[in-house]
Amino acid sequence: MKSVRFPALARRGLFILLASLLASCSHLKPTKTGFLTNYDRLQEDPGNRDRLYYQNLQTRNAISRPVHIAPVVYRPTDIEGTPPSEDSIVRLKAYFDRAMIEEFREAGFRLVREPVSGSLHVKSAITAFNTTRPVLNTVTTIIAVPVDNGGVSVETEILDPANGEVVYAEAASTRGGPLQGKFGRQMVGYFQRHGHAETGLRIIAERTAAALAAR
Protein backbone atom coordinates (compact mmCIF):
# COMPACT_ATOMS: atom_id res chain seq x y z
CA MET A 1 0.00 0.00 0.00
CA LYS A 2 2.81 2.34 0.88
CA SER A 3 4.58 1.66 -2.42
CA VAL A 4 1.42 2.72 -4.26
CA ARG A 5 0.92 5.96 -2.32
CA PHE A 6 4.53 7.17 -2.37
CA PRO A 7 4.72 8.16 -6.04
CA ALA A 8 1.52 10.18 -5.72
CA LEU A 9 2.80 11.94 -2.61
CA ALA A 10 6.14 12.57 -4.31
CA ARG A 11 4.42 14.14 -7.31
CA ARG A 12 2.34 16.31 -5.02
CA GLY A 13 5.41 17.43 -3.12
CA LEU A 14 7.23 18.26 -6.34
CA PHE A 15 4.25 20.31 -7.54
CA ILE A 16 4.19 22.28 -4.29
CA LEU A 17 7.93 22.85 -4.50
CA LEU A 18 7.79 24.15 -8.06
CA ALA A 19 4.84 26.39 -7.25
CA SER A 20 6.77 27.85 -4.34
CA LEU A 21 9.79 28.34 -6.55
CA LEU A 22 7.85 30.30 -9.14
CA ALA A 23 6.14 32.41 -6.49
CA SER A 24 9.27 33.22 -4.54
CA CYS A 25 11.85 34.02 -7.22
CA SER A 26 13.23 37.51 -7.63
CA HIS A 27 11.78 39.03 -10.82
CA LEU A 28 13.64 42.33 -10.93
CA LYS A 29 14.27 43.93 -14.30
CA PRO A 30 16.56 46.71 -15.55
CA THR A 31 15.12 50.08 -14.60
CA LYS A 32 14.91 53.53 -16.19
CA THR A 33 14.60 56.00 -13.32
CA GLY A 34 16.14 59.07 -14.98
CA PHE A 35 19.46 58.61 -13.18
CA LEU A 36 21.38 58.00 -16.41
CA THR A 37 22.08 60.71 -18.96
CA ASN A 38 20.56 58.94 -21.95
CA TYR A 39 18.52 55.74 -22.07
CA ASP A 40 17.92 55.80 -25.80
CA ARG A 41 21.44 54.61 -26.54
CA LEU A 42 21.24 51.57 -24.30
CA GLN A 43 21.21 48.27 -26.13
CA GLU A 44 20.35 44.78 -25.01
CA ASP A 45 23.16 42.41 -24.17
CA PRO A 46 22.65 39.35 -26.42
CA GLY A 47 24.06 37.12 -23.70
CA ASN A 48 22.16 38.64 -20.79
CA ARG A 49 18.51 39.66 -21.11
CA ASP A 50 18.73 41.53 -17.79
CA ARG A 51 21.40 43.96 -18.98
CA LEU A 52 21.11 47.13 -21.07
CA TYR A 53 24.35 48.93 -21.80
CA TYR A 54 26.15 51.58 -23.84
CA GLN A 55 29.86 51.81 -24.53
CA ASN A 56 31.51 54.76 -26.23
CA LEU A 57 33.81 53.19 -28.81
CA GLN A 58 35.70 56.46 -29.26
CA THR A 59 37.19 56.29 -25.76
CA ARG A 60 40.86 55.31 -25.77
CA ASN A 61 43.45 54.49 -23.09
CA ALA A 62 41.03 54.91 -20.20
CA ILE A 63 43.26 52.85 -17.89
CA SER A 64 45.80 55.71 -17.81
CA ARG A 65 43.29 58.22 -16.44
CA PRO A 66 42.42 58.78 -12.77
CA VAL A 67 38.94 57.74 -11.69
CA HIS A 68 36.62 59.41 -9.21
CA ILE A 69 33.88 57.14 -7.84
CA ALA A 70 30.92 59.00 -6.36
CA PRO A 71 29.08 57.52 -3.35
CA VAL A 72 26.34 55.11 -4.34
CA VAL A 73 22.79 56.41 -3.99
CA TYR A 74 19.46 54.65 -3.57
CA ARG A 75 16.95 55.75 -6.20
CA PRO A 76 13.87 53.54 -5.85
CA THR A 77 11.53 52.73 -8.67
CA ASP A 78 7.75 52.62 -8.44
CA ILE A 79 7.73 48.84 -8.03
CA GLU A 80 4.88 47.76 -5.79
CA GLY A 81 5.51 45.82 -2.61
CA THR A 82 6.75 46.25 0.92
CA PRO A 83 9.26 49.12 1.15
CA PRO A 84 12.77 47.93 2.06
CA SER A 85 14.15 48.68 5.49
CA GLU A 86 16.53 51.59 5.97
CA ASP A 87 19.09 49.15 7.39
CA SER A 88 19.06 47.14 4.17
CA ILE A 89 19.43 50.27 2.04
CA VAL A 90 22.40 51.52 4.08
CA ARG A 91 24.04 48.08 4.04
CA LEU A 92 23.76 47.58 0.29
CA LYS A 93 24.91 51.11 -0.53
CA ALA A 94 27.98 50.62 1.65
CA TYR A 95 28.68 47.23 0.11
CA PHE A 96 28.42 48.57 -3.45
CA ASP A 97 30.70 51.49 -2.54
CA ARG A 98 33.35 49.02 -1.36
CA ALA A 99 32.87 46.70 -4.31
CA MET A 100 33.30 49.47 -6.86
CA ILE A 101 36.47 50.77 -5.18
CA GLU A 102 37.94 47.28 -4.86
CA GLU A 103 37.16 46.23 -8.41
CA PHE A 104 38.47 49.43 -10.01
CA ARG A 105 41.68 49.12 -8.02
CA GLU A 106 41.96 45.46 -8.98
CA ALA A 107 41.58 46.46 -12.64
CA GLY A 108 44.55 48.81 -12.27
CA PHE A 109 42.90 52.23 -12.06
CA ARG A 110 44.24 55.06 -9.92
CA LEU A 111 41.38 56.33 -7.78
CA VAL A 112 41.06 59.89 -6.54
CA ARG A 113 38.93 61.18 -3.67
CA GLU A 114 37.84 64.30 -5.57
CA PRO A 115 37.57 65.01 -9.32
CA VAL A 116 40.85 66.23 -10.80
CA SER A 117 41.97 67.34 -14.24
CA GLY A 118 41.54 64.47 -16.68
CA SER A 119 39.66 62.20 -14.28
CA LEU A 120 36.66 60.08 -15.23
CA HIS A 121 33.58 60.18 -13.02
CA VAL A 122 31.68 57.05 -11.97
CA LYS A 123 28.19 57.29 -10.49
CA SER A 124 25.84 54.47 -9.51
CA ALA A 125 22.35 54.02 -8.09
CA ILE A 126 20.67 51.00 -6.56
CA THR A 127 17.12 51.23 -7.89
CA ALA A 128 15.50 48.07 -6.48
CA PHE A 129 16.42 44.95 -4.56
CA ASN A 130 14.96 41.81 -3.04
CA THR A 131 16.30 40.06 0.02
CA THR A 132 16.11 36.33 0.64
CA ARG A 133 14.30 34.48 3.42
CA PRO A 134 16.93 32.25 5.01
CA VAL A 135 14.49 30.45 7.32
CA LEU A 136 12.26 29.46 4.39
CA ASN A 137 15.28 28.26 2.43
CA THR A 138 16.53 26.22 5.37
CA VAL A 139 13.19 24.44 5.64
CA THR A 140 12.84 23.77 1.90
CA THR A 141 16.45 22.58 1.67
CA ILE A 142 15.66 19.84 4.17
CA ILE A 143 12.94 18.66 1.79
CA ALA A 144 14.63 19.37 -1.53
CA VAL A 145 16.20 22.71 -2.51
CA PRO A 146 16.14 26.39 -1.44
CA VAL A 147 13.39 28.26 -3.29
CA ASP A 148 13.59 31.93 -2.28
CA ASN A 149 16.24 34.06 -3.96
CA GLY A 150 17.13 37.72 -3.90
CA GLY A 151 18.41 40.18 -6.46
CA VAL A 152 19.21 43.79 -7.25
CA SER A 153 18.70 46.40 -9.98
CA VAL A 154 21.37 49.00 -10.63
CA GLU A 155 22.02 51.93 -12.94
CA THR A 156 25.63 53.02 -13.36
CA GLU A 157 27.41 55.49 -15.61
CA ILE A 158 30.95 56.65 -16.36
CA LEU A 159 31.31 60.23 -17.57
CA ASP A 160 34.18 62.24 -19.03
CA PRO A 161 33.73 65.71 -17.46
CA ALA A 162 36.17 67.22 -19.95
CA ASN A 163 33.69 66.89 -22.81
CA GLY A 164 30.49 65.76 -21.10
CA GLU A 165 30.51 62.46 -22.97
CA VAL A 166 29.18 59.23 -21.54
CA VAL A 167 31.97 56.65 -21.66
CA TYR A 168 29.92 53.73 -20.37
CA ALA A 169 26.42 53.20 -19.03
CA GLU A 170 24.48 50.21 -17.79
CA ALA A 171 21.04 49.45 -16.43
CA ALA A 172 20.98 45.89 -15.17
CA SER A 173 19.39 43.50 -12.74
CA THR A 174 20.62 40.28 -11.19
CA ARG A 175 18.91 37.38 -9.47
CA GLY A 176 20.42 34.80 -7.19
CA GLY A 177 20.93 31.28 -8.45
CA PRO A 178 23.61 28.67 -9.11
CA LEU A 179 23.74 29.50 -12.82
CA GLN A 180 24.11 33.27 -12.37
CA GLY A 181 27.87 33.39 -11.75
CA LYS A 182 29.96 33.03 -8.58
CA PHE A 183 28.48 29.62 -7.75
CA GLY A 184 29.75 29.42 -4.17
CA ARG A 185 28.51 32.87 -3.22
CA GLN A 186 25.16 32.22 -4.87
CA MET A 187 24.57 29.02 -2.90
CA VAL A 188 25.55 30.64 0.40
CA GLY A 189 23.35 33.60 -0.55
CA TYR A 190 20.21 31.51 -0.10
CA PHE A 191 20.94 31.51 3.63
CA GLN A 192 22.00 35.16 4.00
CA ARG A 193 19.34 37.85 3.82
CA HIS A 194 21.39 40.17 1.61
CA GLY A 195 23.63 37.52 0.07
CA HIS A 196 22.19 37.46 -3.44
CA ALA A 197 21.84 41.23 -3.67
CA GLU A 198 25.45 41.70 -2.58
CA THR A 199 26.70 39.08 -5.04
CA GLY A 200 24.82 40.88 -7.81
CA LEU A 201 26.42 44.17 -6.83
CA ARG A 202 29.85 42.54 -6.92
CA ILE A 203 29.19 41.15 -10.41
CA ILE A 204 28.11 44.57 -11.70
CA ALA A 205 31.14 46.27 -10.09
CA GLU A 206 33.49 43.79 -11.75
CA ARG A 207 31.78 44.25 -15.10
CA THR A 208 31.89 48.04 -14.93
CA ALA A 209 35.59 48.14 -14.09
CA ALA A 210 36.40 45.59 -16.79
CA ALA A 211 34.41 47.51 -19.40
CA LEU A 212 36.35 50.69 -18.73
CA ALA A 213 39.69 48.90 -18.57
CA ALA A 214 39.00 47.48 -22.03
CA ARG A 215 38.83 51.03 -23.43
Image (tube, grey):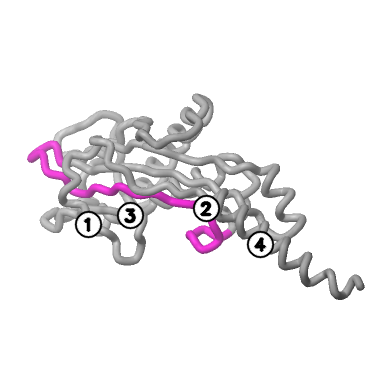
Question: Which region shows up in magenta?
Answer: 160-183
Quarter the C terminus occupies: bottom left
Secondary element type, mark 3: strand
Of mark 3 and mark 1, the one earlier in the sequence is 1
Residue placed farthest to the left in the image? 163
Residue holding disc 1:
43
The correct choice, above or below, for 108 with respect to 32 in the image is below
**Residue 142: percent from left, percent from top:** 76, 55
Question: Which mark identifies residue 15?
Answer: 4
Q: CA distance from mark 3 to mark 1?
A: 8 Å
| Amino acid found under the numbered disc labelled 3 | Arg
Residue holding disc 2:
176
- Taking the spot 48% from the left edge, 59% from the top edge, the residue there is 180
Residue placed farthest to the top in the image? 86
Q: Nearer the viewer, mark 3 or mark 4?
A: 4
Q: Is residue 140 left or right of residue 83?
A: right
**Residue 214: percent from left, percent from top:** 25, 59
Question: Which mark identifies residue 51?
Answer: 3
Crowd around label 1: few <14 · some 14–19 · many ≥20 (10 Å): some
Q: CA distance from mark 3 to mark 2?
A: 15 Å
| Amino acid found under the numbered disc labelled 4 | Phe
Q: CA distance from mark 3 to mark 4?
A: 31 Å
Of mark 3 and mark 2, the one earlier in the sequence is 3
Q: Nearer the viewer, mark 4 or mark 1?
A: 4
Of mark 2 and mark 4, the one earlier in the sequence is 4
Of mark 4 and mark 1, the one earlier in the sequence is 4
- Taking the spot 59% from the left edge, 57% from the top edge, the residue there is 184
Question: Which mark identifies residue 149?
Answer: none
Q: CA distance from mark 4 to mark 1?
A: 38 Å
Check residue 163 for magenta coloring. yes
